Image: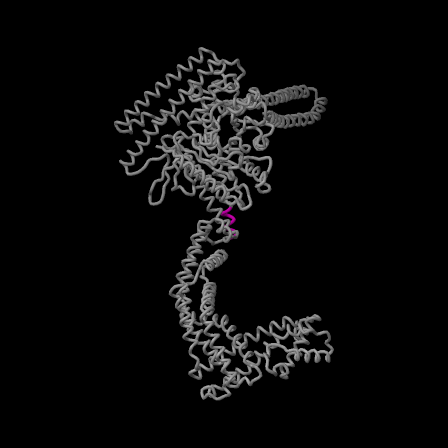
Amino acid sequence: QAALMAALANKSSVALSRRCTTAHTSISSNSCALVPQRRALSASSSSGQQQGEQRRQRLRWLVRQTSLLRAVRLRYLLAAGAAAVAFESNRRYSEFKAGLSDTGWLTDRLRSFAELAANAGNGAAAKVRHVVDQKDHMHSAMQDFQSWLARHGSRTYTSLVSTGSDSAKRASAVAASWFSFDSDGKQQQPQEQQPDEQLRQQMLELQAKYQRELESLESEVRALRSQLAEAKRASRGGGSGSFSVSGGGGRQLHKSLVELYSEVLDALSEHDSKFSVADHLPRVVVVGDQSSGKTSVLEMIAKARIFPRGAGEMMTRAPVQVTLAEGPYHVARFKDNPSREYDLTQESELAALRDTIERRMRSVVQSGGTVSAETISLSVQGPGLPRMVLVDLPGIISTETRGMASQTREAIRQLASQHMRNPNSIILCVADACVDPERSNAFDLVARHDPSGRRTIFVLTKLDLAERDRISPDRIGRLLAGRLLPLKALGYFAVVTGSGGADESIPAIQRYEEQFFRNSQFFKEGVLSVSQMTAANMAQAVSRRFWALVQESVEAQADAFKASRFNLETEWKHMFPGRRQYSRAELFERARSDLLDEVIALSALPAKHWEDSLRAGLERSLTPQALDALLEFSALCNNGEDPSSHSAAAELQSRLDIWLRKWADTELPSQCVQTAWEELYAQLDGLPRQPDHDPVLEPLQAAVRAEARKAHRWDPKAEGALRVLQMAALDERAVPTRADWDGAVALLRRVLQRRLAEVESELAKSCGPGAWERWTQWRGRTEAQQRLVQLSNELRNCLLTGAAVGGRRNPAELSDEDLIAVRRNLLTKGVEGVTDEELRSAWPLVYRQFALRCGLDSCAQCAKLYYHYQQRIGTAADCIAVPFFYRVGRMLDATSSALRQQIVNNEAHRLEKAVKSVLDAWADDPAKLREYLRGRSVQLAEDVQRLRLVEEKLDQFIEALNATKDPKRSR
């Protein structure tokens, strides 16, 4: 105000100064103009007198003008002062009006009974008239009670109804659920007074009596409303609810105001933490030390023992958002499973609900952690429940005990700060009356987030234990008056949450609380006022404050969300022009469709394509084993005789027959199935992508294929069918035609070439770079590699000269004579210190390379010897490998054809089931979707769509909220 007045005065002063300056300038100029005139007057006396008179008149006019300007300046100062006084008066009137008590709860409770009776049937109308009579009787009784208090002149009554209207005073005396506020928003504390025990006892008894009568009337009204709703449904074929929200197919869903508001909060809680939107919607945040009674207070408000309990241990491990709403039946349900209702009047259902909440808390806590920031949403409906949304947080601790994760204390404090940081949240600070306030960990945290106490309500629990332990009444009084702690609060309440029994019911706790406060020394000595006692008064006060904040802030929040969505949509248009926005759920459905189309496309592949790919895969995986067996048995049968001799060939043929039969009977079918399984997924991965394929989907599709591959199992009957086919194919030993002979030779050549390339690659890796690499890439060999090269060359020379293959022994092994000969040759070349171990370790690769090269040479010769084989000429004995690989080739052909039929007829469908199973499991797993569907486009589209959902729910809630303010609009 001072600044405004100073600004107005300054502005007026500047304007007047400018005008005065102009006037003085005009006077000076006029004075200068009069000088030559004065000289002319001295020259002419007759004309000078006349001109002098004119000059004096002009000067008098200038003086009057200057005086007028000074008067105008004073007018501006007076106008500025009047404006400041008007502004200050308007401000004080606004503060006075805001400080008046809200009596809207009476309109909420005392509905239009006449309208209710007009819409009801004959039987219901009689009940309504009875309820109206009871209501009138109650009003007269309340007026008598007020008059009685006025006659006694109690200062307790004066402090109780010192502010507010007449209806507010009657509400304070009847329900005792009202606390008043001064102009600063602080609860007015009762004045110190002399205790009047008889007066206080009568006040408490009257309060309990009228409270019971009011609850009885409310229950009758609820029953009548239920009857009216059933009558309307029967007559109109529809239901009645608080507010109608359009559903699918023209169906009307009826939801209460608090349920609509809870849906808004649930939509906001699903937001990704990386996307920051100012969520300042009101909630009631329950904060306090561990074991201070937070959860018990919440249960008293919900009128059900719904939370897990434990003596001295942490039970609340994650935030639990509880939406309280009034309803005909006392039930609870989780937001993500609304079909499952828990009847809170049944102890077995309460136990099941507590177990479910505990399991959910443990499931959201990550491995190795103690608490989680993920919110569990629960809805509770019941008769007489206050309408609001509460969030129960883990209790604040001072020390981390064994079994807790590191940084648990800090994690709890950060979680509490995150919820209290909301400027529109109501902080329900719960404290234990038996614990010294100086030892509390919650008070400083609450005071830091709400230093003025504009949104904090203080609740003191366990007053019965404090009285039993003889806690100082003066200390309790100063604590509830806000004079003991630096913590400021909007209101102070004292509650009792039970006598200590673990299985104590809510009605029993309420009776115990009423009995305690009736006989409490704290109340008799004036420490407590009527408005500060019982959980019912506290719940009503919190509910009123909650809805006041909702009405004040919800429209501003809706505008903020609209602005955020506009900014995100602008960013999308700049970064991804022309692209449609898909959420993660929509992208997942696209990926599902593409994957299932790909699986179906496998069955549509041509039969020749399947058989060629399967045969190539079988050839790569099986023929190396056949070649190894052939080389091994050839070395065993070469015992000094001519390899082309009849006995050596017969022995080799016998060994190969035995090995083939054993192979087909044991390992071969399973190896073929494994190869077909790998080829199936290779074909799935190699299918061409659709033209509109989105690269964002690729990580998810690859992960689904990998998971389906783990889950997919080949039909166990397939191996038995393959075994029969393979045994029959391997039993045919003769090569019937020249084409079959050439095909077997080509197969043998391919196998030898692949194996020779592998052996030479391994040799090159061991011996270092060759001559070409050394010259072109400037690479050199180490001393060990150079030594290995010298050893390999000498062993290769021995093989070429036949020194290591003579005698009656296995040429795949070096004898002592061979070792001596090789060392002697190396010594002559200057290589000293060669050991037997070095030679034996270098020998297998050298011998394998030599044998494969000899096999390739023999393969080229055998290609021309089909006639010798057909005529059983002895030279064909060197080509025993060709019939062997002919049998292997026939087995490969038969196996690839059988596997192709199994894939098309059975395995493609089994794969489709495995893919569907993985997709169904991941569809309800948001973590999987966030893990595999990444990218700025995904996150941006997700944020835009979620903000649209929040806006839609906020608009529905605001419309319903406005309907409650405008009865004509609601009707």
The number of discs equals 0
For the N terminus, the quadrant is top right
Name the quadrant of the C terminus. Answer: top left
Q: Is residue 810 visible?
A: yes
**In this view, 142 is above or below 547:** above
**878 on left or right of 800:** left
Determine if the magenta segment contains residue 810: no
Residue 329 falls left or right of residue 437: left
Task: Confirm whether residue 776 shows in the render.
Answer: no
Q: Position of residue 666 (x, y in %)?
A: 46, 69
Dominant SS of magenta comes to helix
Residue 572 lies in the magenta stretch: yes
Viewer-closest of 744 and 266: 744
Which residue is painted at 51% across and 80% down in the image? 652
Give how far across and how far down residue 630 sits, in percent: 52, 77
Range drawn in magenta: 568-575
Viewer-side residue, 228 vs 34: 228
Looking at the image, residue 758 sits to the left or right of residue 303; the answer is right
Residue 894 spot, x, y in % from top left:
41, 73
Q: Position of residue 108 (x, y in %)?
A: 39, 27
State the image quarter where residue 733 is shown.
Answer: bottom left
Residue found farthest to the left: 122
Which of the two residues, 640 or 57, is positioned nearer the viewer here?
A: 640
- The answer to which of 559 and 263 lies nearer the viewer is 263
In which image quadrant can residue 514 be found? Answer: top left
